Image (tube, rainbow, N blue to C red):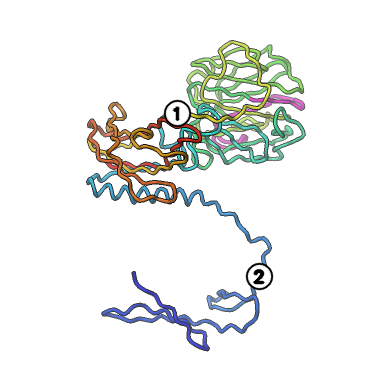
Amino acid sequence: MSEIKLKADTGGGTVSFKGPASTTSNTAVQLTLPVDDGTANQVLKTDGNGALAWVAQTTDTNTDTVYDDSNLRRDLNTLALQTAVDTNRKAYNLQNSFIDQFEDSSGITTKTNTKVLSEAVTTVYTGYDDNTVIMWHCDSSSMVDDSQNGITGITFHNGAGYSTADKKFGTGSIYFDGTTDYMSTGNLKTATSGGIPVPTTGDFTLDFWCKYNSRSAADRLIATGNSGTPSGGSNTSFTMGYNQTNRFNVYSGSADAHWTGWPSYDTSWHHYAFMRDGTTLYAWKDGSYQSSTTILNNHDIFDDDANIFLGQRGGHSGEDFNGYLDEIRLSDNKRYTASTNFTAPSSAYPASTISNATGSIVSSVSTASDARTKVSGVLLYKNVSGTCTLGTDLKVYFSCNNGTNWTEVGASEFTAGSDFTTGIKTVYLAEKTCTSGTQIKYKVEWANQSNGSKVTELHGIALNY
């Protein structure tokens, strides 16, 4: 690397930058600086004409900025994998590669007993089960999602917001005054709002607590799936609310179910639950089974953008809700037994330490231009607790035919590289021969994990093929 020398001329304002001597030049570049007149609190800045001048420093009493370095750390993880995978490419002459560094779940096809953390995947964690897609306790103005997905991008509109005036559980709830106010998420399928695998046409359960202040016309409590604001964009994919005193309505965007005979509207807290089991949507109020409908049979409840609106209907102005919502949970499974009463929750859904001894993830497919039979790779992993034995506590498999056949990396075929950073280790995976195919993917399995004694985080994986 070339050496740059700095020289300040005595008594003047000239600073010289002199490069190293070479066979062709010994060039010096001079930068002329104005002489400091000794006035306190001056800084060197450019004036409006581009010339340098000493100017009084402006005092700013609020200059501290909190820097979010999460994206930088993710980029560094990716850079580490890119560097390592380039080394592997040269070692095995495998020219194609792909990298997963787990900013979200988008690179994973299936996962069992695993949680995608910030930049890592682990099998031992504190939180809610894997089927909990969203868990809003509504206990803060930031609408924290306590599920493993941790969605962001929540926006309150026109006066809607957190309130401590009334709530079912915890410290507060979300309040809507019935006049154009609502809450919205971004597109839950994108990384900016979470990048989470939302339920679409399969089983799901949506349950929440609701308290009305008053009603004057049709209103909507929750709506999903829409491109745009409630007053614009395409129609909603799934929404619900009262449209008469004793008639609850569920709408799919093209068909609806009017459930006459529901308990009449009142101003007390009530628990609502909706569950799709196969082709049928079941509904409960306060744990009492109400009725079912098939209008959501094979219907994508997050069609178009995967938005959620609270307090208004998507794709339509009006139908505003006046009241409170609390303890909102969306799950991608069946929480209740079809057509059967249950006891409504008596407290907020509790988080617990989930100690999974085993777990697994399978990647999305990377399609090769022609059939391949050779795969190698690189891991970034971290021992949070205990020491992981590669090939036993953390296993890796390759496939060239979309997982029809898997080839395991043997315990002796993990080669340690230089640590990427403190605690995060780099490991090279041997080249393996797989059943021929064009659909390349990996599988990672955890075993013997135990909270506090052995916890292994996967921070990234890259494949050469």
Compared with residue 119, is residue 354 higher up or lower down, i.e. above or below? above
* Residue of label 1: 357
- The structure residue drawn at horizontal position 23% and vertical position 38%, both measured from the top left corner, is 374
Compared with residue 169, is residue 244 higher up or lower down, i.e. above or below? above
Q: Quadrant of residue 98?
A: top left
Compared with residue 213, is residue 263 higher up or lower down, i.e. above or below? above
* Amino acid type, callout 1: Ala
Horizontal relation, residue 217 to residue 453: left or right: right
Horizontal relation, residue 303 to residue 288: left or right: left
What secondary structure is found at the residue carrying circle 1? loop
Q: Quadrant of the N terminus?
A: bottom left
Q: Give the magenta-colored segment's residue range.
A: 208-233
Pick whichever, 456 or 281, lies toward us.
Answer: 456
- The structure residue drawn at horizontal position 31% and vertical position 47%, both measured from the top left corner, is 85
Magenta residues, dominant SS class: loop
Horizontal relation, residue 298 to residue 437: left or right: right
Q: Residues within 10 Å of mark 2 (few under 14, many from 20)?
A: few
Q: Residues within 10 Å of mark 1 (few under 14, many from 20)?
A: some
In the rendered structure, which disc, 2 or 1, sits on the residue that comes first in sequence?
2
* Residue of label 2: 58
Q: Is residue 223 magenta?
A: yes
Task: Give the image location of residue 441, x and y in percent.
Answer: 33, 34
What secondary structure is found at the residue carrying circle 2? loop
Task: Give the image location of residue 206, x and y in percent.
Answer: 58, 24
Kindly tell me whether residue 371 is visible in this rendering. no
